[in-house]
Every structure is written in structure tokens, then in C-alpha cells.
Amino acid sequence: MTEYYINKIYFHYNDNSDYGLYILFELNDRGYLLFDSTSFLLLAEIDKYKNFTWKEINYKVDKGLFIINIKEEELVNYFVEFSNNDILYIYQRIDGLECVEQDFMIVKKEDNFYNEVFSHMNESFVERVKL
């Protein structure tokens, strides 16, 4: 996989959709990487998405941080592995109204559930995403 160096990471929830999570990676010299609730897209420009209410993810992006791996489990779970071994974990859950929602967390190696997420990401049925 090509090394995609990250400047910043943003998210947006579309309240009009069950699967309304968008994540935007601002890349050093390759534009943007967008997660649009079901897939990852490399974009030179984000004009179509500029009206979204983007919020920066509270995560320290060190200089030289890059994406080394993106994996998907049957359009349910997604894993973005960074060069520092942290994992952006995108998952689905059912809210109190029985609606499916997408959410995310960044899992660090020192977190209690890191090994669980890392093992899940490396199951044989979890496929690598090609950009």
C-alpha cells in the first residue's frame, strides 16, 4: 500500500442517515482520503463535501504519521492502521430506537481493548481495502 501521510483527521455525522459517518483524512501531498460510510475514496478536492460540519478528531497527529493499512469486514467494521500502531476503528451499534449507527474510536496500543481490536482486524475474513 502507498504510504499516505496525514496532516489532520476530521469527522462529520449526517443525521439524516443511519450510516451517516464521514471521516476525512487531510493528506500531505495527495489531497484527501474520505470514508463515506461504506467506502474509502482518494480525492484531489473536497468541494462536494465543503458544506459538511467537519470537526477535527481529538488526536495528536505526529509529523510523519501515515496510514499503513485499511481493512473492512463486510461493510460493518473498518480498520485504519497507522504507522505508530494506533488503529482508527469504525464500527456499528444499535441505538435505543433500534437504529443502526456508525461510530469510531482511535485505539492505542496501551488501551485495554487494543489486542481485541488488533486481533479482529487480522481475522482471515477481514479484507484489505484497495484504493
Image (cartoon, rainbow, N blue to C red):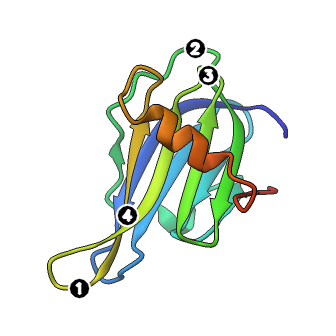
Above or below, 91 relative to 110 = below
Q: Which mark is residue 52?
A: 4
Mark 1 vs mark 4: in front:
1
Mark 2 vs mark 1: in front:
1
Q: Which of marks 2 and 4 is nearer the N terminus?
A: 4
Quarter of the image for residue 41 reads bottom right
Q: Mark 2 points at which residue?
A: 63
**Callout 1: SS:** loop
Mark 2 vs mark 4: in front:
2
Q: Earlier in the sequence, mark 2 or mark 1?
A: 2
Mark 4 vs mark 3: in front:
3
Q: In this view, does 70 lie to the left or right of 90?
A: right
Above or below, 3 relative to 15 = above
Above or below, 102 relative to 27 = below
**Callout 4: SS:** loop
Label 2, label 4: how far apart the Cα atoms are: 26 Å
Point out the image quarter for the N terminus: top right
Q: Position of residue 47 (x, y in %)?
A: 55, 62
Q: For the residue marked with disc 2, what is the amino acid?
A: Lys
Q: Earlier in the sequence, mark 4 or mark 3?
A: 4
Disc 3 vs disc 2: Cβ atoms closer than 8 Å? yes
Q: Mark 1 points at which residue?
A: 98
Label 1, label 4: how far apart the Cα atoms are: 26 Å
Q: Name the residue under label 3.
A: 65
Q: For the residue marked with disc 4, what is the amino acid?
A: Phe
Q: Which mark is residue 81?
A: none
